[in-house]
Image: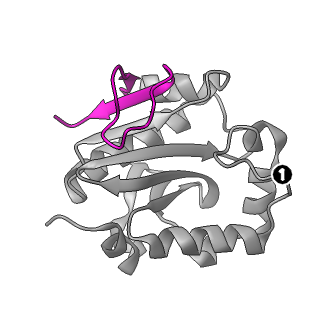
């Protein structure tokens, strides 16, 4: 059965994506927002690559608002990455339409970067949404200076995309694609 983003949020625990015995992803809900989460995305090495980089520090309130807006949008899903019981990152699918979606990732757990968690989370999320939501193509716009993100998406099977995206985003050579077809 094909689900919508709204369906995924109805029962987040039943939409868990297992990565390994200690790690999983599931739709993020407001109750997952903690001070540790806000602090994690405020770390300079994380914040500098976030889309819509906010000039002010994120708070529990602003992050909760972001999670709520995504949950209610009907065209996006934030999956929380949980490792050993701790929320340490997110994968966000957004602008979901016509079998296409955009993906972004933020790993904010300390001492987790460079250990392959990003690639594992990207691949697991992509494969799950290909089956559950019916998405065929996932695009990622990556800052060329974000070499860790480029490596994570490459290791997950994404390749550089040439051409015009279905939603007419101008391709400046920094767009990557992963396809189910």
Q: Position of residue 73 (x, y in %)?
A: 45, 71
Q: Secondary structure at mark 1?
A: loop
x, y percent for residue 106: 62, 45
Q: Which is nearer the eye, 109 or 92? A: 92
Residue 29, above or below 164: below
Quarter the C terminus occupies: top left
Tell me, yes or no, if residue 158 can be seen here.
yes
Q: Residues within 10 Å of mark 1 (few under 14, many from 20)?
A: few
Q: Is residue 156 visible in the rendered structure shown here?
A: no
Residue 36, x across and y down, in percent:
78, 62
Q: Which residues are magenta?
A: 157-181
Residue at 13% from the left image edge and 66% from the top image edge: 1
Which of the 4 quarters of the picture holds residue 156?
top left
Looking at this view, is 25 or 69 the one in front? 69
Query: To which residue does mark 1 refer?
Result: 55
How far from the left and from the top, in percent, is residue 151? Answer: 53, 22
Which residue is more in the foreground, 169 or 86? 169
Q: Tell whether position 172 is magenta.
A: yes
In terms of secondary structure, what is the magenta stretch mainly? loop
- Which of the colour schemes (rainbow, by chain, secondary structure, one colour) is used? one colour
Q: Residue 135 versus residue 14: which sits nearer the camera?
A: 135
Residue 165 sits in quarter: top left
Q: Residue at x 34, y 29 (%)?
A: 164
Asked whether, in this view, residue 173 is left or right of residue 41, the answer is: left
Image height of 151 relative to 95, above or below: above
Image quadrant of residue 175?
top left
Classify 67 as above or below 146.
Answer: below
Membership of 60 in magenta stretch: no
Tell me if 42 is positioned left or right of 37 in this view.
right
Residue drawn at x 47%, y 29% is 153
């Amino acid at each position: 059965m094909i689900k919508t983003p709204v369906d995924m949020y109805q029962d987040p625990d039943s939409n868990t994506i297992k990565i390994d015995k200690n790690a999983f992803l599931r739709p993020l809900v407001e109750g997952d927002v903690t001070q540790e989460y806000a602090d994690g995305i405020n770390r300079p090495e994380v914040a500098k690559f976030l889309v819509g980089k906010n000039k002010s520090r994120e708070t529990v309130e602003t992050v909760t608002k972001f999670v709520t807006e995504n949950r209610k949008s009907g065209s996006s899903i934030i999956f929380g990455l949980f490792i050993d019981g701790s929320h340490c990152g997110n994968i966000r699918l957004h602008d979901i339409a016509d079998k296409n979606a955009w993906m972004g990732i933020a790993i904010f757990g300390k001492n987790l970067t460079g250990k392959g968690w990003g690639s594992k989370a990207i691949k697991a999320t992509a494969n799950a949404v290909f089956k559950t939501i019916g998405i065929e193509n996932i695009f990622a716009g990556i800052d060329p200076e974000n070499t860790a993100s480029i490596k994570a998406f490459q290791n997950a099977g994404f390749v550089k995309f040439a051409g015009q995206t279905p939603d007419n985003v101008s391709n400046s050579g920094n767009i990557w694609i992963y396809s189910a077809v």
